[in-house]
Amino acid sequence: MTETIMPGAEYIYPNVTEATQRGGLLERWRLAEPLGCRYIEIPADFIKNQTEVERTGQDIGSMLNRSSVELLYDRDTTLPGALRYLLHTEPAIPRRTPHGRQATASLRWRDPDWVAAFGDMLLEIEDVLGIPPEIIEIHPGDRKNTHADIIAGMHALIVTHWNAFGAEPLVLLEHHKDQGISTASQMRMFWATLNDLHPEIAGLAGIVLDPWHLHAAAKEEFPGSLGEVPPDALQAFHIHSDLRPPSVADSLPWPQVFETIGGVKTPRIKPVVYQKSRVPGAIAFCEEMLAAPRAVYAEPPA
């Protein structure tokens, strides 16, 4: 039975653990389509675990080369015309090496050669998958990357895809509580810098807001912080409670979050849960919150 999705909201089917680690497009599309999801999420991490080290001969945290891409991804022979996907790139989170140490991949937006190699890796993945992505999610990495560095990288990715496919993806920055862009004020400054340096990509770039990570950074200041995020930057939302399905019992004020989401013309929502059984409930929660009467968040009279 097909679920009914709220008009105006477009859902992204998350990268569930039951799907082949990287795999192809069709396996995920068959999970997503019955739920009415418009997009599927495809991971584009660097080498991330011992299994991939053994299969590819590459080290943890290294960019995939062409032969590794062909080993890890599947090429489906026929793809439905309605299939759209989001490429979720390297999140720069700590991973365990074969020697038991922790390693975190370095995102070097400040290095044009690195950015070019990163773009080439994405093109190799997309070539094997068979079609380019509609959306690419990137992460800020550490504080050595300035806002201008990241914006130059976003611009380069858009140009690279235009040159390769004649199509421009939407490139979204995902803030993270322990990376260089984590707070609402940093997001606001980032967006102001983008509009100053590359205003021509403002319609092709933006921020994917993760309320849980913003709440972790802002704590009791969250309500005001949410209001600081520039509305015209918001293109997508990650909805979860520390990677679990959200609930009205959470400390995070979901009604205020969905007030913000409801103000976006076509919000793209990814329920960040990794078990197939949890996706329908997470989508249903979002639908219920979007359908609820709008709360009013105003300062009390003096």
Image (cartoon, rainbow, N blue to C red):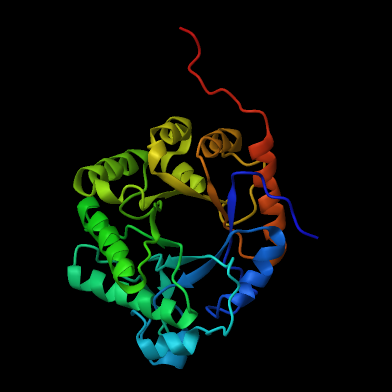
Q: Residue furthest top?
A: 302
Residue 15 horizontal side relative to residue 208, left or right: right
Q: Quadrant of residue 106?
A: bottom left
Vertical order, 292 against 300 (above or below): below
The reply to whether residue 170 is visible in this rendering is: yes
188 or 106, which lies in front? 188
Q: Quadrant of the image for the N terminus?
A: bottom right
33 or 192, which lies in front? 33
133 or 257, which lies in front? 133
Q: Position of residue 55 (x, y in %)?
A: 46, 92
Vertical order, 160 against 273 (above or below): below
| Picture residue at 50% right of the left edge, 19% below the top | 298
| Picture residue at 41% right of the left edge, 34% below the top | 225
Residue 107 horizontal side relative to residue 298, left or right: left
Vertical order, 269 against 163 (above or below): above
Q: Position of residue 14 (x, y in %)?
A: 58, 63
| Picture residue at 63% right of the left edge, 70% below the top | 29
Q: Position of residue 45 (x, y in %)?
A: 42, 73
Q: Quadrant of residue 136?
A: bottom left
Q: Position of residue 151 (x, y in %)?
A: 26, 54
Q: How many marks?
A: 0
The reply to whether residue 47 is visible in this rendering is: no
